[in-house]
Image (cartoon, rainbow, N blue to C red):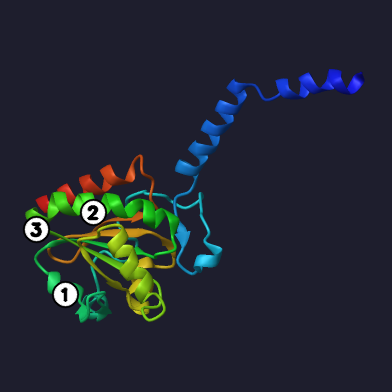
């Protein structure tokens, strides 16, 4: 008899309302608590960092202008050849550091594709440089580009370029807004779908006015 009396009490602990609230809370944590990965992690141990300065735009400390080593670096292109940032002189540039295994990077990519379509006719170029090993990740990057219909330039960052731009903060994705004369005016670390796309859009608008 006692077991039968206890059963209704256990069921009442999880009412439809409580279940709904729990599911909503978990969804909000997934959407806003996860913002970035560490570029040193591998796909098998993807790490998120809710303590990172997610999507907070700021001038890259200690690196206001792209150094010659970064401008001249020969980054391997996904379609062959090399990608040199110096070849984009005179254009507003968005450089995005990412990886195929990075969850926030995957969430961010469709937004970057939208921004590229909106701004490319206004003199904005977009370059996505993976921080992965180009030989080991060639097929994954190719699949990624096809899956997300990426229409901007994709390749792999040289180690020196990535380290120089990151300045010790290795969380990805990272995006850099660069003016026509090679100055970094905004840097975004991490991605939050509720705020980052609009912040990047505003930064591009500002860079076009310089």
**Disc 3 secondary structure class:** loop
Question: Along the line of sight, which residue is nearer the eye, 35 or 30?
Answer: 30
Is 164 left or right of 10, judged from the image as shown?
left
Looking at the image, do the residues carrying marks 1 and 3 touch, with CB atoms under 8 Å apart?
no
- Name the residue carrying label 3: 123
Going 20% across and 72% down the picture, which residue do you hit?
85
Q: What secondary structure is marked by label 2? A: helix
The residue carrying mark 2 is: 113
10 Å neighbourhood of mark 2: few (<14), some, or many (≥20)?
some
Q: Mark 1 points at which residue?
A: 86
> Which residue is found at the position 80% from the left and 23% from the top?
7
First in residue order: circle 1 vs circle 2 = 1
Is residue 8 visible in the rendered structure shown here?
A: yes
Image coordinates of residue 66 in percent, x first then y, are 24, 70
**Above or below 209: residue 5:** above
Closest to the observer: 4 or 190?
A: 4
Examine the rendered structure and indicate whether residue 77 appears above or below residue 7: below
Q: In this view, does 176 lie above or below 3?
A: below
187 vs 21, left or right, is: left
Q: In this view, does 160 lie to the left or right of 25?
A: left
Q: Where is residue 110 in the image (x, y as percent from the top left)?
A: 29, 51
Residue contact at pointers 1 and 2, CB within 8 angstroms: no
**Figure quadrant of the N terminus:** top right
Q: How many residues crowd around disc 3 within 10 Å: few (fewer than 14), some, or many (20 or more)?
A: few
Q: Return the x and y of residue 68 as percentages of the image width and height.
A: 22, 78
């Amino acid at each position: 008899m006692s077991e039968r009396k206890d059963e209704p009490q256990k069921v009442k602990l999880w009412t439809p309302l409580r279940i709904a609230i729990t599911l909503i809370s978990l969804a909000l944590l997934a959407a806003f608590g996860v913002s970035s990965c560490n570029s040193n992690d591998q796909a098998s141990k993807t790490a998120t960092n809710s303590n990172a300065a997610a999507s907070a735009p700021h001038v890259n400390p200690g690196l206001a202008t792209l150094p010659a080593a970064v401008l001249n670096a020969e980054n391997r292109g996904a379609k062959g050849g090399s990608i040199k940032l110096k070849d984009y002189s005179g254009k507003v540039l968005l450089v995005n550091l990412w990886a195929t295994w990075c969850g926030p990077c995957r969430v961010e990519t469709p937004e970057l594709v939208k921004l590229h379509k909106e701004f490319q006719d206004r003199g904005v170029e977009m370059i996505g440089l993976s921080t992965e090993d180009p030989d080991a990740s060639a097929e994954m990057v190719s699949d990624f580009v096809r899956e997300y219909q990426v229409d901007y330039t994709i390749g792999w960052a040289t180690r020196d370029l990535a380290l120089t731009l990151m300045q010790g903060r290795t969380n990805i994705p990272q995006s850099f807004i660069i003016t026509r004369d090679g100055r970094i005016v905004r840097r975004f670390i991490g991605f939050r779908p509720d705020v980052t796309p609009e912040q990047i859009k505003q930064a591009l608008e500002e860079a076009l006015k310089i």
